[in-house]
Amino acid sequence: MERSGYGRDGIYRSLRPTLIVPKDPNLSMVSFLFRNSNSYPHKPALIDADLSITLSFAQLKSIVVKVSHGLRHLVISKNDVVLIFAPNSYQYLICFLAITAIGAIATTANPLYTTTELSKQIKDSKPKLVITVPELWNKVKDFNLPAVFLGSKESLSIEPNSRIKSFHHLVELGGSNSEFPENKVKQTDTAALLYSSGTTGTSKGVILTHGNFIAASLMVTMDQEMAGEMHHVFLCVLPMFHVFGLSVITYSQLQKGNAIVSMAKFDFEMVLKNVEKYRVTHLWIVPPVILALAKQSSVKKYDLSSLQHVGSGAAPLGKELMEECAKRIPHAAVAQGYGMTETTGIVSVENPRIGIRHSGSAGILAPGVEAQIISVDTLKPLPPNQLGEIWVRGPNMMQGLQLNISISLNQLSGYLNNPQATKQTIDKKGWVAPAELEGLLVSHPEILDAVVIPFPDAEAGEVPVAYIVRSPNSSLTEEDVLKFIADQVAPFKRLRRVNFINSVPKSASGKILRRELIEKAKSKI
């Protein structure tokens, strides 16, 4: 095997130590999370920065136990789907863990979704219960689902005998129970149905098992384990409805015994305040926030000396921006990783303690991951330094999905390079699927064809721009198109600009030559 991890069989293998996953088939992700918590019962586990509430590991387990019994009282059983449609909070995570503890399946949705967008997920996932907040109730009330409202006891006014219950009522239903309900949850059972960003079309439910979460959590924390590190504090400002916030940050770190500080929404000034207040050691974020750390003068107003590690994911982070951020926070290592919903959030990650620093790469394969770089044309394995699709396998992979992203592995280091992805998504402070916007555009009676591409943006990373072919004699304007889309999608999905063209470039087989339009747009920057 070469230094890159490349073998004679054309398979790349992780250069990290061997991953050892639990062999017990009758192990749930919640049991795994609390397996060692009796050793540190009073240690802070979950801190809600918005409500100034701190739960120790013992308190967290106690409330999760009670809520899991409460869900049973609401007749939620194994394999039933429960939708969580809410912003980050300590109650959000408790509900997620309680759902999975009884063998039910959690599906999560972006609070910014419109009713139309939400209806697609509800129709597909068929939840029996929705967990939400009063502020979002108007978006879900017409689906006629029983509901649980999150929020403080004082802020909730719920009529008796209503189909709506409060989080605190769930806790009360749990009574004096101190042990989880009897269940037969296995590692192979489905824990979550997380909806992808729709890289090849509309968003699809990704089935992740208890074993997937357990394996991914061990992959994410392997470098900490090897370094003998403990007692870290992670800030979770990324949404828990997304695999990065839910799996990579929250679940993975809690099972390691680290503390999580949650924030309901992103506010850069509040991020800095919370890093200072809670002595946050690890800040895992996305490139637009890295840009703010590197550029915003307000960074100097706060004591960020506790930061040891700044991590980035969800979109490529360039070498230059990594270096700028590292200069602003010299005491913290800046690194990035790569993952997706289908891999429970991890494929590769840099280890700043070894190897190249601020390389602009997405690091080396996580422990337990094997990969091949495949030619798009021949579907045969490629040698190092060739561009193709990466095919990945490992215990963190969702069942039955082959992954496609244009990427290459460096022969000398085994580091994943970050060229443009063949997956069709736009990383705009959210995860925008062009196929979804294109489907809406061509539904307009005066639009014959449409293609949506990513366009670089300093603040958001990328924004969606549309190229449209109008029908003959159409008087459709850019403003008309922008409003047409804005009325149907969440704010982060809205088009930034519209260009009118005579025809959409396509290959002989009819595939959109998206790359031509992307290069054309970039040439005008």
Image: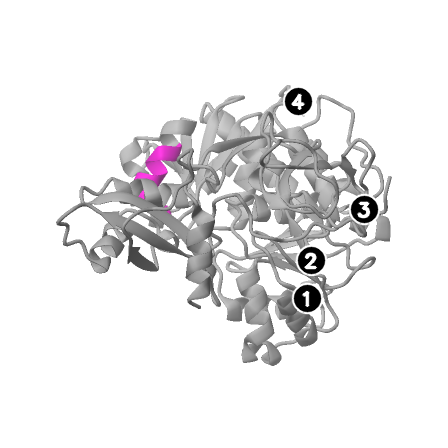
Task: Judge depth for marks 1 and 3 and give the one in front.
Answer: 3
| Residue numbers of the magenta segment | 113-121
Task: State whether residue 156 appears in this view.
Answer: no
Task: Judge depth for marks 1 and 4 and give the one in front.
Answer: 4
Q: Does the magenta stretch include residue 120?
A: yes
Task: Judge depth for marks 3 and 4 and give the one in front.
Answer: 3
Q: Which residue is drawn at 80% across and 52% down?
A: 413
Residue with the mark numbered 3 = 4
Q: Which of 22 and 333 is in front in this view?
A: 333
Task: State whether residue 354 appears in this view.
Answer: yes
- SS under mark 2: strand
Q: Badge 3, how many Cα within 10 Å: few under 14, some, many 20+?
A: many
Q: Earlier in the sequence, mark 1 or mark 4?
A: 4
Residue with the mark numbered 1 = 279
Is 129 placed above or below 303 here?
Answer: above
Q: Residue at x 47, y 42 (%)?
A: 197
Q: Label 4 is placed on what type of residue?
A: Lys
Task: Judge depth for marks 3 and 2 and give the one in front.
Answer: 3
